[in-house]
Image (spheres, rainbow, N blue to C red):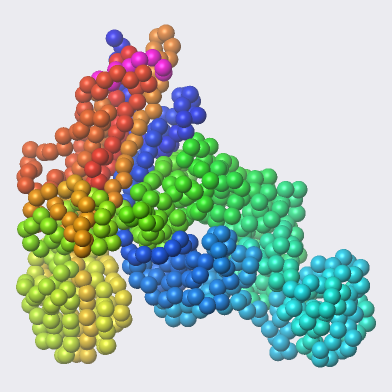
Amino acid sequence: MPVARLLQTNFTSGRIDESMLGRVETTMYQNGVEDLLNFEILVQGGITRRRGQVYLNDFGQKVRLIPFIFNETQVNVLAFSPSDIKVYTIDGTLRQTISSSIPWSTLDQVEEIRWDQKGDVLVLANGIKLSTLTRTASNTFALADFDWETDANNNSKEPLFKYADAGVTLTASGTTGSVTFTTSADVFVAAHVGAILVKNDVQATITGFTDARNVTATWTTTGTTTATADWSESAFGEARGWPRAVAFHGGRLWLAGNDALPSHVFSSQSSAFFNFDFGTGEAAEAISGSVAGNRIGNIQHLISAEALFVVSDGALAFIPENDTNPVTPATFNPRQVEPYGGSRVRPIVYDESIAYPQLKGRVVREVQRDEFTLRVKTRPVSFVATDIVRNITFSAVQNYTKDRPESFGYFGNSDGTVAVYHALRTENFAAWCNWNTQGKWISMCAINDELFTCVERKINGVAKYSFEKFDSDYSLDSAERKMVTAASNAHTVTTRLVGESVHIVSIEENVIANGAFDNATGWTLGTGWSVSSGLVGAAGSASEAKITGLTDGARYRIEGKITAHSAGDLTIDCGYNATLGAISRTVITGAVGSFSFDVTCAGDTNLYLRKGSSGAFTVNNLSVRLLDEDDRIVIKRRYLGTATVGSGGAITLPSDWTSQWVEVGFDYSSQVTMLPPAINAEDGNILTEPKRIVSAAVSCSKVLSLTVGGKKALLLQVSDDFSEPLTPFTGVKEIYNLGWDRLGRIPVTMPEPLPGSILAISREVVF
């Protein structure tokens, strides 16, 4: 019988929709797979089991997560709910709850929030109110109505517009103080109270409503009484609606999409974000204009990229500009690009393009602007994965992860799954894979290299909303770790999951100080230093504390948290040379907060904690962990099976266990299924002919658990000590006699919750 040997060296086309199974001639088919569940696609072409999720806190309800990034280290996760805004640090600590003057009251209104940030200020728009969330101090914010700039006469610099027909006139009963304003046609509603009227360039604030043609208003300065068609009113407010879209772009703040002007945009003056005074139309003054186009409807989003893009529910448009010709009142000329509108889900800026879900949330489109011709074009990028892109309800983008250079776009579906998009334009590939978890992802946001999420999980039948973080150091979801200090099979781990069946993974790390610090064993303590009950304390005169056990030239990750501080800085030396002094020194400036850094040990084999004469602080959970050649923590893992969390958070392990840590949480399946091989025989293609899979070879990198075609791969190595955790397998693993399958597909799984990567798969097929 004929034999075909097929090698797939990369997975850069990702998961292929079943409707593409007949397109065997395409490169997409050759580099794609039928299923790619809970993997991440690597930039080199391989795939790796997705990161686990560490449990941080309990939100208590559904929330929408929005990132706040002031600088690289001063960041917060903001959790928006119908009743409040909660401010968290990235370690999951709740620092502030804002519950007064919340302008939204339903989860649907929360989902409508559009936002953009500049410095300390987050501007929030959702068609209900225009608000600012301002960072007033570290981890402290203030929510307020948007405060338009005013001049010395208290004239508001908010945007203005004449909604009435051009010929409608406005008359005032007096020139100063509180007077009656009358229009020649019906204009006013009760909600106009609080809005601004401008008549012949003089402002008045409406204080009372009489009827559709008469209101009471107070002049800011001396006005005029005669009827004139030269008048306008507040563009935004309770009467005309508030903007739905907001963006900082080109040194201006842009607002758009209120009820009365759904396809109109306004910008602030240049470098004056709260001043929307149009003036006389000079280059730096504010801009007002309609986004014309036969399909432009309600503006949903304003996206700042190499140009300002306008996503409406009916079409895409952009405002042309270049480096030498920025947008001004004179050059403002929006152009409709494509008749493909967007949904309310926030578009993402990704790999020199914009990706946005279309109106029904079933298609993701990509927008690119040619750097030479400046033409803008769009294309659907999810047509190869229509079965995993289903009714998108949220999005997030991550430009890099903690350990890897890959960037990912995340599109959450209404069923709680996530379609993950990975593209690398320089290598001309784009790929999708799908993720799921034991529960539903509700929202995600990325901050620097971290990805955070709100997850709905049923715990004993009750919906709980967990604050979790994706972390490559974890291999379970909603995971917690517990230090094991005694040889026993009974341990107390978590009261949160009482009654739930959890999976258990043992964790052994090459650590110098493991974070427990129950006593000072192994430490050499100078004056004023103490080690007890998980804390390292420093007080008194200048001195040092040290612990030995490092390796000169090795890389370490040093982490901890200053939980109390009254004076001085903490200096950490990773090794010390008697002649050269400190070579690898890091100074933690005096403040309460977490720290984490990677460093190479240089000099001797000691870790030194040093302080000045005034130093007085407490360090909690200090850990020094060995890193591998990829700057990843060296961890040995073993899967211990499942257990039900009993009363008080107790679990029973299969046997006595003395690893440093056990990790408990929920498992998630990881599977890649190869596409049917496209083999051209002498008498034609045999795509649907019966085939026998003689063997398969999987190129692995640091794999601890593997099945191929339902057969478990033996990963033990000759040098392995069976009493110790397995050594991760790197190399090619062959599996034989995989049986008959008409389409010749092979499922490859990682059945245990342990990390690993697959670089290539080959098949030997008889037909």
Point out the stretch of residues depicted in magenta.
687-694
Q: Is residue 662 above or below residue 568?
A: above
Is residue 254 in the magenta section? no
Quadrant into which the C terminus falls: top left
Q: Residue at x 86, y 81 (%)?
A: 181
Residue 377 at x, y percent in the picture: 62, 45
Q: Residue at x 22, y 55 (%)?
A: 645
| Nearest the eye: 198 or 350 | 198
Q: Residue at x 31, y 41 (%)?
A: 670
Residue 738 at x, y percent in the picture: 25, 23
Residue 33 visible in the current orientation: yes
Q: Is residue 709 above or below residue 63?
A: above
Residue 372 visible in the current orientation: no
Residue 583 at x, y percent in the picture: 19, 71
Which quadrant of the figure has residue 306? bottom right
Give the left or right position of residue 606, taking residue 754 as reference. Answer: left
Residue 514 at x, y percent in the picture: 15, 66
Give the left or right position of residue 528, taking residue 708 as reference. Answer: left
